[in-house]
Image: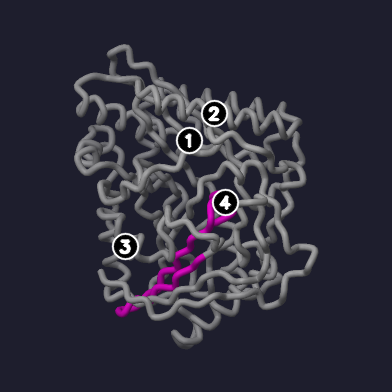
Amino acid sequence: MEVRIHSRKLIKPSNPTPHHLRTMKLTSFDQIAPKSYGSFVYFYPSSRYTISSEDERLKQLERSLSELLTLFYPLAGRFHEDDNSIDCNDQGAELVEAEVNSHLRDVLRDAGADGNLINQLVPFDELAWTTVMLGVQINKFNRGGLAVGVSLSHKLADGFTIFSFVNGWANSCNFGLNSVKRLSFDAASVLPPRVLNPLYGVPLPDDNSHKLSTKRFVFSAAAITNLKSKTKNIPSRARGVMALIWKARICVAQAKQGKFRDSVLIFPLNFRGKTAIPIPENAAGNFFKNLTVRFTAKGKKPELDDLVGLVQGAMKTATENFAKTEAAEELFSSATDCSKDIHEEIVRGTANICVCSSCCGFPYYEADFGWGRPKGIASVHKPTDFVLMMDDSCGRGIEAWVTLEPDDMVRFGQDPDIIAFSSVARSDL
Protein backbone atom coordinates (compact mmCIF):
# COMPACT_ATOMS: atom_id res chain seq x y z
CA MET A 1 0.00 0.00 0.00
CA GLU A 2 1.34 3.42 -0.97
CA VAL A 3 -0.06 6.61 0.55
CA ARG A 4 0.71 9.89 -1.24
CA ILE A 5 0.19 13.16 0.62
CA HIS A 6 -1.42 15.76 -1.66
CA SER A 7 -1.78 18.66 0.75
CA ARG A 8 -1.47 19.85 4.33
CA LYS A 9 -3.29 22.87 5.67
CA LEU A 10 -4.50 24.39 8.90
CA ILE A 11 -8.26 24.62 9.41
CA LYS A 12 -9.28 27.50 11.62
CA PRO A 13 -12.65 27.98 13.34
CA SER A 14 -15.19 29.66 11.05
CA ASN A 15 -15.66 32.32 13.73
CA PRO A 16 -12.99 33.59 16.15
CA THR A 17 -12.98 32.24 19.68
CA PRO A 18 -14.23 34.88 22.17
CA HIS A 19 -11.53 36.50 24.27
CA HIS A 20 -12.83 35.06 27.57
CA LEU A 21 -12.38 31.52 26.20
CA ARG A 22 -8.84 32.02 24.93
CA THR A 23 -7.17 30.06 27.73
CA MET A 24 -8.26 26.58 28.74
CA LYS A 25 -6.68 25.28 31.92
CA LEU A 26 -5.93 21.57 32.00
CA THR A 27 -7.22 19.39 34.81
CA SER A 28 -4.86 17.56 37.13
CA PHE A 29 -5.72 14.37 35.21
CA ASP A 30 -4.79 16.03 31.90
CA GLN A 31 -1.47 16.98 33.47
CA ILE A 32 -0.53 13.36 34.14
CA ALA A 33 -1.72 12.15 30.72
CA PRO A 34 1.14 11.15 28.40
CA LYS A 35 2.46 13.42 25.67
CA SER A 36 1.08 11.36 22.85
CA TYR A 37 -1.79 11.15 20.36
CA GLY A 38 -4.83 8.90 20.35
CA SER A 39 -5.63 7.85 16.78
CA PHE A 40 -8.38 5.97 14.97
CA VAL A 41 -9.35 5.43 11.32
CA TYR A 42 -12.95 5.27 10.07
CA PHE A 43 -13.57 3.38 6.80
CA TYR A 44 -16.38 4.28 4.37
CA PRO A 45 -16.97 2.17 1.21
CA SER A 46 -17.57 4.09 -2.01
CA SER A 47 -21.04 2.58 -2.46
CA ARG A 48 -22.23 4.57 0.53
CA TYR A 49 -21.49 8.01 -0.89
CA THR A 50 -24.50 10.20 -1.58
CA ILE A 51 -22.68 13.47 -2.27
CA SER A 52 -22.37 14.35 -5.96
CA SER A 53 -18.61 14.58 -6.38
CA GLU A 54 -15.38 13.81 -4.61
CA ASP A 55 -14.34 17.47 -4.57
CA GLU A 56 -17.64 18.45 -2.96
CA ARG A 57 -17.20 15.75 -0.31
CA LEU A 58 -13.81 17.13 0.65
CA LYS A 59 -15.08 20.71 0.70
CA GLN A 60 -17.96 19.66 2.92
CA LEU A 61 -15.63 17.87 5.32
CA GLU A 62 -13.36 20.92 5.50
CA ARG A 63 -16.24 23.37 5.87
CA SER A 64 -17.97 21.37 8.60
CA LEU A 65 -14.67 20.91 10.48
CA SER A 66 -14.14 24.67 10.46
CA GLU A 67 -17.67 25.21 11.78
CA LEU A 68 -17.28 22.51 14.44
CA LEU A 69 -14.09 24.12 15.76
CA THR A 70 -16.16 27.09 16.92
CA LEU A 71 -17.69 24.69 19.48
CA PHE A 72 -14.58 22.52 20.01
CA TYR A 73 -12.30 25.58 20.06
CA PRO A 74 -9.40 24.13 22.16
CA LEU A 75 -8.75 21.65 19.33
CA ALA A 76 -7.68 24.56 17.13
CA GLY A 77 -5.30 25.84 19.81
CA ARG A 78 -1.81 24.96 21.01
CA PHE A 79 -0.56 23.25 24.17
CA HIS A 80 1.40 25.34 26.68
CA GLU A 81 3.31 23.18 29.14
CA ASP A 82 4.62 26.06 31.26
CA ASP A 83 1.21 27.00 32.62
CA ASN A 84 -0.63 23.69 32.04
CA SER A 85 -3.05 25.17 29.56
CA ILE A 86 -4.18 25.27 25.96
CA ASP A 87 -3.87 28.59 24.18
CA CYS A 88 -7.16 28.68 22.24
CA ASN A 89 -5.62 30.97 19.64
CA ASP A 90 -7.45 29.63 16.56
CA GLN A 91 -4.15 28.69 14.96
CA GLY A 92 -5.93 25.70 13.50
CA ALA A 93 -6.23 21.93 13.32
CA GLU A 94 -4.06 20.17 10.75
CA LEU A 95 -5.88 18.69 7.74
CA VAL A 96 -4.05 16.27 5.46
CA GLU A 97 -5.41 15.06 2.12
CA ALA A 98 -3.92 11.82 0.82
CA GLU A 99 -4.44 9.25 -1.94
CA VAL A 100 -4.08 5.50 -1.41
CA ASN A 101 -3.20 3.31 -4.39
CA SER A 102 -5.31 0.39 -3.24
CA HIS A 103 -8.85 -0.77 -2.72
CA LEU A 104 -10.31 0.06 0.67
CA ARG A 105 -11.49 -3.52 1.09
CA ASP A 106 -7.95 -4.84 0.56
CA VAL A 107 -6.42 -2.39 3.03
CA LEU A 108 -8.84 -3.23 5.81
CA ARG A 109 -8.46 -6.93 5.11
CA ASP A 110 -4.66 -6.76 5.19
CA ALA A 111 -4.66 -4.46 8.23
CA GLY A 112 -6.37 -7.19 10.23
CA ALA A 113 -3.22 -9.26 9.89
CA ASP A 114 -0.77 -6.34 9.78
CA GLY A 115 -2.01 -3.38 11.80
CA ASN A 116 1.14 -1.38 10.96
CA LEU A 117 -0.59 -0.36 7.71
CA ILE A 118 -3.13 1.74 9.62
CA ASN A 119 -0.48 4.21 10.82
CA GLN A 120 -0.07 5.52 7.28
CA LEU A 121 -3.70 6.71 7.34
CA VAL A 122 -3.41 9.07 10.34
CA PRO A 123 -1.62 12.44 10.47
CA PHE A 124 0.54 11.84 13.57
CA ASP A 125 2.45 8.90 14.98
CA GLU A 126 1.39 8.19 18.54
CA LEU A 127 4.64 9.42 20.10
CA ALA A 128 5.38 12.20 17.57
CA TRP A 129 4.62 14.90 20.10
CA THR A 130 3.87 18.47 18.96
CA THR A 131 1.82 21.30 20.46
CA VAL A 132 -0.87 20.78 17.78
CA MET A 133 -4.00 19.44 19.45
CA LEU A 134 -5.80 17.88 16.48
CA GLY A 135 -4.89 16.41 13.12
CA VAL A 136 -7.17 14.72 10.59
CA GLN A 137 -6.24 12.87 7.41
CA ILE A 138 -8.71 12.30 4.57
CA ASN A 139 -7.58 9.25 2.59
CA LYS A 140 -9.05 8.73 -0.90
CA PHE A 141 -8.70 5.23 -2.30
CA ASN A 142 -8.04 5.21 -6.03
CA ARG A 143 -10.44 2.31 -6.49
CA GLY A 144 -13.14 3.95 -4.42
CA GLY A 145 -13.77 4.51 -0.76
CA LEU A 146 -12.67 6.93 1.88
CA ALA A 147 -10.92 6.62 5.25
CA VAL A 148 -10.96 9.40 7.83
CA GLY A 149 -7.97 9.28 10.17
CA VAL A 150 -8.07 11.28 13.40
CA SER A 151 -5.23 12.04 15.84
CA LEU A 152 -6.11 13.96 18.99
CA SER A 153 -3.66 15.00 21.71
CA HIS A 154 -3.88 12.82 24.80
CA LYS A 155 -3.28 15.99 26.84
CA LEU A 156 -6.91 16.87 26.17
CA ALA A 157 -8.56 13.67 25.04
CA ASP A 158 -9.46 10.24 26.30
CA GLY A 159 -11.55 7.82 24.23
CA PHE A 160 -14.82 9.54 25.13
CA THR A 161 -13.44 12.91 23.94
CA ILE A 162 -12.08 11.52 20.67
CA PHE A 163 -15.28 9.70 19.75
CA SER A 164 -17.42 12.69 20.77
CA PHE A 165 -15.37 14.90 18.46
CA VAL A 166 -15.70 12.54 15.49
CA ASN A 167 -19.44 12.11 16.03
CA GLY A 168 -19.79 15.87 16.35
CA TRP A 169 -17.89 16.42 13.11
CA ALA A 170 -20.03 13.82 11.34
CA ASN A 171 -23.25 15.41 12.58
CA SER A 172 -22.04 18.87 11.61
CA CYS A 173 -21.22 17.60 8.11
CA ASN A 174 -24.46 15.67 7.69
CA PHE A 175 -27.08 17.66 9.58
CA GLY A 176 -25.53 21.02 10.48
CA LEU A 177 -23.93 22.53 13.56
CA ASN A 178 -27.15 22.67 15.58
CA SER A 179 -27.23 18.85 15.71
CA VAL A 180 -23.89 18.59 17.50
CA LYS A 181 -23.71 17.47 21.13
CA ARG A 182 -21.40 19.94 22.80
CA LEU A 183 -18.57 19.12 25.17
CA SER A 184 -17.68 21.03 28.31
CA PHE A 185 -14.15 22.46 28.45
CA ASP A 186 -14.33 23.81 32.01
CA ALA A 187 -13.53 20.76 34.14
CA ALA A 188 -10.39 22.40 35.57
CA SER A 189 -12.73 24.39 37.81
CA VAL A 190 -13.47 21.18 39.75
CA LEU A 191 -10.21 19.27 39.09
CA PRO A 192 -7.63 22.08 39.09
CA PRO A 193 -4.01 21.58 37.98
CA ARG A 194 -1.32 21.16 40.62
CA VAL A 195 2.42 20.83 41.19
CA LEU A 196 3.33 17.28 40.26
CA ASN A 197 5.85 14.66 41.26
CA PRO A 198 7.36 13.08 38.10
CA LEU A 199 6.15 9.66 39.28
CA TYR A 200 2.53 10.82 39.10
CA GLY A 201 2.35 10.69 35.33
CA VAL A 202 1.20 7.83 33.15
CA PRO A 203 4.44 6.16 31.95
CA LEU A 204 5.34 7.00 28.36
CA PRO A 205 6.87 3.94 26.68
CA ASP A 206 9.95 3.87 24.50
CA ASP A 207 9.11 3.68 20.82
CA ASN A 208 9.54 0.01 19.99
CA SER A 209 7.17 0.11 17.01
CA HIS A 210 9.73 -1.42 14.67
CA LYS A 211 10.12 -4.44 16.98
CA LEU A 212 6.40 -5.14 17.30
CA SER A 213 3.48 -6.32 15.20
CA THR A 214 -0.24 -5.63 15.48
CA LYS A 215 -3.13 -7.91 14.56
CA ARG A 216 -6.88 -7.67 14.97
CA PHE A 217 -8.63 -10.60 16.63
CA VAL A 218 -12.41 -10.77 16.29
CA PHE A 219 -14.58 -12.30 19.01
CA SER A 220 -17.97 -12.72 17.37
CA ALA A 221 -21.27 -12.44 19.23
CA ALA A 222 -21.72 -16.20 18.90
CA ALA A 223 -18.23 -16.86 20.27
CA ILE A 224 -18.86 -14.58 23.26
CA THR A 225 -22.15 -16.37 23.98
CA ASN A 226 -20.24 -19.66 23.86
CA LEU A 227 -17.58 -18.20 26.17
CA LYS A 228 -20.22 -17.15 28.71
CA SER A 229 -21.71 -20.65 28.67
CA LYS A 230 -18.37 -22.17 29.66
CA THR A 231 -17.70 -19.95 32.67
CA LYS A 232 -19.48 -19.40 35.97
CA ASN A 233 -20.00 -15.66 35.77
CA ILE A 234 -19.07 -13.18 33.04
CA PRO A 235 -20.85 -9.91 33.85
CA SER A 236 -20.17 -8.29 30.46
CA ARG A 237 -18.73 -9.01 27.02
CA ALA A 238 -15.76 -6.71 27.58
CA ARG A 239 -14.75 -8.13 30.95
CA GLY A 240 -14.99 -11.69 29.70
CA VAL A 241 -12.85 -11.03 26.63
CA MET A 242 -10.38 -8.95 28.64
CA ALA A 243 -9.92 -11.81 31.11
CA LEU A 244 -9.54 -14.31 28.26
CA ILE A 245 -6.86 -12.19 26.60
CA TRP A 246 -5.07 -11.76 29.93
CA LYS A 247 -5.10 -15.53 30.42
CA ALA A 248 -3.60 -16.04 26.96
CA ARG A 249 -0.90 -13.44 27.68
CA ILE A 250 0.00 -15.23 30.93
CA CYS A 251 0.35 -18.49 28.99
CA VAL A 252 2.46 -16.77 26.30
CA ALA A 253 4.83 -15.54 29.03
CA GLN A 254 5.01 -19.07 30.50
CA ALA A 255 5.96 -20.55 27.12
CA LYS A 256 8.64 -17.89 26.74
CA GLN A 257 10.04 -17.96 30.29
CA GLY A 258 9.56 -21.62 31.17
CA LYS A 259 7.32 -21.09 34.19
CA PHE A 260 4.19 -19.28 35.29
CA ARG A 261 5.02 -15.89 36.78
CA ASP A 262 2.86 -13.32 38.51
CA SER A 263 1.06 -11.05 36.07
CA VAL A 264 -0.34 -7.54 36.52
CA LEU A 265 -3.21 -6.40 34.33
CA ILE A 266 -3.51 -2.62 33.88
CA PHE A 267 -6.68 -1.12 32.45
CA PRO A 268 -8.42 2.28 32.61
CA LEU A 269 -11.86 2.93 34.07
CA ASN A 270 -13.89 6.00 33.10
CA PHE A 271 -15.17 7.87 36.17
CA ARG A 272 -17.52 10.38 34.48
CA GLY A 273 -20.80 10.32 36.37
CA LYS A 274 -19.45 7.93 39.01
CA THR A 275 -18.18 10.36 41.70
CA ALA A 276 -19.80 12.90 44.00
CA ILE A 277 -17.58 15.56 42.41
CA PRO A 278 -19.67 17.68 39.97
CA ILE A 279 -17.76 16.68 36.84
CA PRO A 280 -19.95 17.28 33.76
CA GLU A 281 -20.78 14.01 32.04
CA ASN A 282 -19.93 15.71 28.73
CA ALA A 283 -16.55 16.95 29.99
CA ALA A 284 -13.68 16.88 27.50
CA GLY A 285 -10.37 15.65 28.83
CA ASN A 286 -8.95 12.66 30.64
CA PHE A 287 -11.41 11.26 33.17
CA PHE A 288 -10.17 7.79 33.86
CA LYS A 289 -8.17 6.00 36.50
CA ASN A 290 -5.87 3.10 35.72
CA LEU A 291 -6.71 -0.01 37.71
CA THR A 292 -4.21 -2.77 38.46
CA VAL A 293 -5.07 -6.39 39.11
CA ARG A 294 -2.51 -8.98 40.15
CA PHE A 295 -2.57 -12.68 39.35
CA THR A 296 -0.33 -14.56 41.78
CA ALA A 297 0.90 -17.61 39.92
CA LYS A 298 2.33 -19.91 42.62
CA GLY A 299 3.48 -22.07 39.74
CA LYS A 300 -0.05 -22.78 38.55
CA LYS A 301 -1.89 -22.09 35.31
CA PRO A 302 -4.60 -19.44 35.67
CA GLU A 303 -8.27 -20.33 35.49
CA LEU A 304 -10.50 -18.05 33.44
CA ASP A 305 -13.14 -17.83 36.17
CA ASP A 306 -10.50 -16.63 38.63
CA LEU A 307 -9.26 -13.92 36.26
CA VAL A 308 -12.81 -12.76 35.54
CA GLY A 309 -13.35 -12.52 39.29
CA LEU A 310 -10.19 -10.44 39.73
CA VAL A 311 -11.20 -8.00 36.98
CA GLN A 312 -14.77 -7.78 38.26
CA GLY A 313 -13.62 -7.30 41.83
CA ALA A 314 -11.26 -4.46 40.90
CA MET A 315 -13.99 -2.67 38.95
CA LYS A 316 -16.55 -3.13 41.72
CA THR A 317 -14.18 -1.77 44.36
CA ALA A 318 -13.17 1.19 42.20
CA THR A 319 -16.80 2.04 41.40
CA GLU A 320 -17.74 1.91 45.08
CA ASN A 321 -14.80 4.14 45.98
CA PHE A 322 -15.71 6.59 43.20
CA ALA A 323 -19.23 6.90 44.62
CA LYS A 324 -17.81 7.88 48.02
CA THR A 325 -15.31 10.38 46.61
CA GLU A 326 -16.32 13.98 47.24
CA ALA A 327 -12.99 15.83 47.06
CA ALA A 328 -10.82 16.38 43.96
CA GLU A 329 -7.67 15.82 46.02
CA GLU A 330 -8.89 12.38 47.11
CA LEU A 331 -9.70 11.35 43.53
CA PHE A 332 -6.36 12.58 42.24
CA SER A 333 -4.42 10.89 45.05
CA SER A 334 -6.03 7.55 44.29
CA ALA A 335 -5.00 7.86 40.64
CA THR A 336 -1.42 8.92 41.39
CA ASP A 337 -1.05 6.13 43.95
CA CYS A 338 -1.87 3.72 41.14
CA SER A 339 0.70 5.39 38.84
CA LYS A 340 3.36 5.01 41.54
CA ASP A 341 2.42 1.35 41.97
CA ILE A 342 2.84 0.81 38.23
CA HIS A 343 6.26 2.50 38.23
CA GLU A 344 7.38 0.37 41.18
CA GLU A 345 6.06 -2.82 39.56
CA ILE A 346 8.03 -2.09 36.39
CA VAL A 347 11.22 -1.38 38.38
CA ARG A 348 10.88 -4.58 40.45
CA GLY A 349 10.38 -6.72 37.36
CA THR A 350 8.87 -9.58 39.36
CA ALA A 351 5.68 -9.75 37.29
CA ASN A 352 4.73 -9.62 33.65
CA ILE A 353 2.72 -6.56 32.63
CA CYS A 354 -0.39 -6.72 30.44
CA VAL A 355 -1.97 -3.40 29.42
CA CYS A 356 -5.49 -3.58 28.04
CA SER A 357 -7.93 -0.76 27.27
CA SER A 358 -11.59 -1.22 26.42
CA CYS A 359 -13.46 1.27 24.23
CA CYS A 360 -16.52 -0.98 24.15
CA GLY A 361 -19.83 0.79 24.63
CA PHE A 362 -18.88 4.10 23.00
CA PRO A 363 -21.13 5.06 20.05
CA TYR A 364 -18.35 5.44 17.48
CA TYR A 365 -20.31 3.68 14.74
CA GLU A 366 -22.77 6.60 14.74
CA ALA A 367 -20.25 8.72 12.81
CA ASP A 368 -22.28 9.27 9.60
CA PHE A 369 -20.83 12.13 7.52
CA GLY A 370 -23.60 11.79 4.97
CA TRP A 371 -22.67 8.55 3.25
CA GLY A 372 -23.70 6.05 5.91
CA ARG A 373 -22.17 4.67 9.07
CA PRO A 374 -18.57 3.42 8.95
CA LYS A 375 -18.15 -0.17 7.89
CA GLY A 376 -15.08 -0.53 10.06
CA ILE A 377 -13.02 1.41 12.60
CA ALA A 378 -9.35 0.66 13.20
CA SER A 379 -6.88 1.37 15.96
CA VAL A 380 -3.27 2.14 15.05
CA HIS A 381 -0.13 0.10 15.59
CA LYS A 382 1.18 0.84 19.09
CA PRO A 383 4.78 1.56 20.20
CA THR A 384 4.56 -0.95 23.08
CA ASP A 385 2.79 -4.20 24.05
CA PHE A 386 -0.86 -3.27 24.19
CA VAL A 387 -4.41 -4.52 23.69
CA LEU A 388 -7.23 -2.22 22.58
CA MET A 389 -10.77 -3.62 22.55
CA MET A 390 -13.61 -2.14 20.49
CA ASP A 391 -17.14 -3.17 19.57
CA ASP A 392 -17.60 -4.66 16.13
CA SER A 393 -19.90 -2.90 13.66
CA CYS A 394 -22.92 -4.88 14.92
CA GLY A 395 -22.27 -3.91 18.54
CA ARG A 396 -22.44 -7.46 19.86
CA GLY A 397 -18.96 -8.78 19.12
CA ILE A 398 -15.55 -7.40 20.06
CA GLU A 399 -12.47 -6.62 17.98
CA ALA A 400 -9.18 -6.72 19.88
CA TRP A 401 -6.20 -4.91 18.34
CA VAL A 402 -3.21 -6.71 19.86
CA THR A 403 0.37 -5.39 19.70
CA LEU A 404 3.15 -7.80 20.68
CA GLU A 405 6.63 -8.91 19.72
CA PRO A 406 6.39 -11.15 16.62
CA ASP A 407 7.30 -14.37 18.46
CA ASP A 408 4.80 -13.58 21.21
CA MET A 409 2.17 -12.84 18.58
CA VAL A 410 2.64 -16.31 17.11
CA ARG A 411 2.26 -17.88 20.56
CA PHE A 412 -0.77 -15.70 21.30
CA GLY A 413 -2.46 -16.72 18.05
CA GLN A 414 -1.81 -20.38 18.84
CA ASP A 415 -3.28 -20.21 22.35
CA PRO A 416 -6.16 -22.73 22.56
CA ASP A 417 -8.61 -20.17 23.98
CA ILE A 418 -7.75 -17.59 21.31
CA ILE A 419 -8.20 -20.24 18.61
CA ALA A 420 -11.51 -21.39 20.14
CA PHE A 421 -13.13 -17.98 20.58
CA SER A 422 -11.62 -15.65 17.97
CA SER A 423 -10.32 -15.30 14.45
CA VAL A 424 -7.78 -12.99 12.84
CA ALA A 425 -10.02 -10.48 11.10
CA ARG A 426 -10.72 -10.56 7.39
CA SER A 427 -12.75 -7.72 5.91
CA ASP A 428 -16.13 -8.17 4.26
CA LEU A 429 -16.35 -4.61 2.89
Alpha carbon separation for disc pair 1 and 2: 11 Å
- Label 3 or label 2, whichever comes before in sequence order: 3
Query: Mark 3: which amino acid?
Result: Leu
Query: SS at mark 4?
Result: loop
What residue lies at 33% left-to-right and 16% top-to-bottom? Answer: 297
- From the top left corner, tell me how far across and down residue 350 is, in percent: 35, 20
- Label 3 or label 4, whichever comes before in sequence order: 3
Query: Mark 4: which amino acid?
Result: Lys
Camera-side residue of 35 and 62: 35
- Label 1 or label 2, whichever comes before in sequence order: 1
- Region of the chain picked out in magenta, as a range: 135-162
Alpha carbon separation for disc pair 2 and 4: 19 Å
Disc 4 marks which residue?
Answer: 155
Alpha carbon separation for disc pair 3 and 4: 29 Å
Quadrant for residue 47, please give it: bottom left
Q: Kindly identify which numbered label has been placed on residue 133.
A: none
What residue lies at 40% left-to-right and 57% top-to-bottom? Answer: 378
Q: Are marks 1 and 3 in contact (CB under 8 Å)?
A: no
Q: Quarter of the image for the N terminus: give it.
A: bottom left
What residue lies at 37% left-to-right and 49% top-to-bottom? Answer: 382
Q: Looking at the picture, does residue 380 appear above or below residue 237? A: below
Query: Mark 1: which amino acid?
Result: Phe
Eye-nearest disc, 3 or 2: 2
Disc 1 marks which residue?
Answer: 267
Query: Mark 2: which amino acid?
Result: Cys
- From the top left corner, tell me how far across and down residue 246 is, in percent: 36, 31
Disc 2 marks which residue?
Answer: 338
Q: Looking at the picture, does residue 181 appear above or below residue 407? A: below
Q: Kindly identify which numbered label has been placed on residue 108.
A: 3
Eye-nearest disc, 1 or 4: 4
